[in-house]
Amino acid sequence: MGLQEQVRRTNDVPIEPVEHPQWEGAHVRPMSARALGEFQKMAAPEGEDDERPFELALHIMAFLVTHCLCDDQGVRVFGDDEVDWVECNKRAELLEPIANAACKLHGFDDADEDDREKN
């Protein structure tokens, strides 16, 4: 087997279960490299301080849910183009556990803890 085939066949997408008050069987998986790049641009735009408008925070949460929510086999629930649907049709309190689990999976919560410890 050549390297290209080996890379394509490697299952390198960890799937983590999420305790959710309404969505039994919810899991998260990492974002693709492209989605992660989009997320980082959105979450930390250059030249802006840490005070993000509330609307942007909700959009970021919907983005995380859209790109990370999956079933126990790693099959995503939403397509890339459904961020707006999720944002407009789902309550924030239902998105939050998924978004938090996705952040933890990507290691974003570790950076937040480090920042809190420094202050």
Image: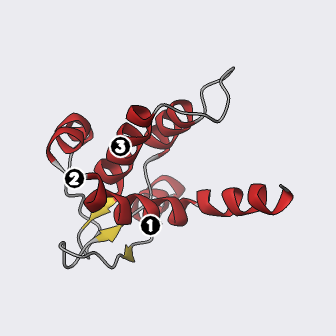
Identify the amino acid type marked 1: Ala
Which comes before the other along the chain, label 2 or label 3?
Answer: 3
Residue mark closest to the camera, 1 vs 2: 2
Choose top left, top right, bottom left or bottom right for residue 9: bottom left
Mark pair 1, 3: CA separation: 13 Å
Q: Quadrant of the C terminus?
A: bottom right
Choose top left, top right, bottom left or bottom right for residue 72: bottom left
Q: Secondary structure at mark 2?
A: loop
29 to 81, vertically: above or below? below
Residue in view at x 42 percent, y 33 percent: 56
Residue in view at x 47 percent, y 33 percent: 38
The residue lying toward the viewer, choosing from 118 and 109, is: 118
Identify the amino acid type marked 3: Phe
> What colour scheme has been applied to the protein in the rendered image?
secondary structure
Identify the amino acid type marked 2: Arg
From the viewer's perspective, is 50 left or right of 26? right
42 to 12, vertically: above or below? above
Q: Which residue is mark 3?
A: 63
From the viewer's perspective, is 14 left or right of 48? left
Q: Which residue is mark 2?
A: 91
Choose top left, top right, bottom left or bottom right for residue 70: bottom left
User: Which disc is residue 101 wearing?
Assistant: 1
Q: Secondary structure at mark 1?
A: helix
Which comes before the other along the chain, label 1 or label 3?
Answer: 3
Q: Residue furthest top?
A: 47
26 to 5, vertically: above or below? below
Q: Secondary structure at mark 3?
A: helix
Graded by Cα atoms within 10 Å as few (under 14), some (14 to 19) or many (20 or more), the crowding at tag 3 reads: many
**Dots 1, 2 in contact, CB < 8 A:** no
Give residue 64's position: percent from left, percent from top. 38, 50
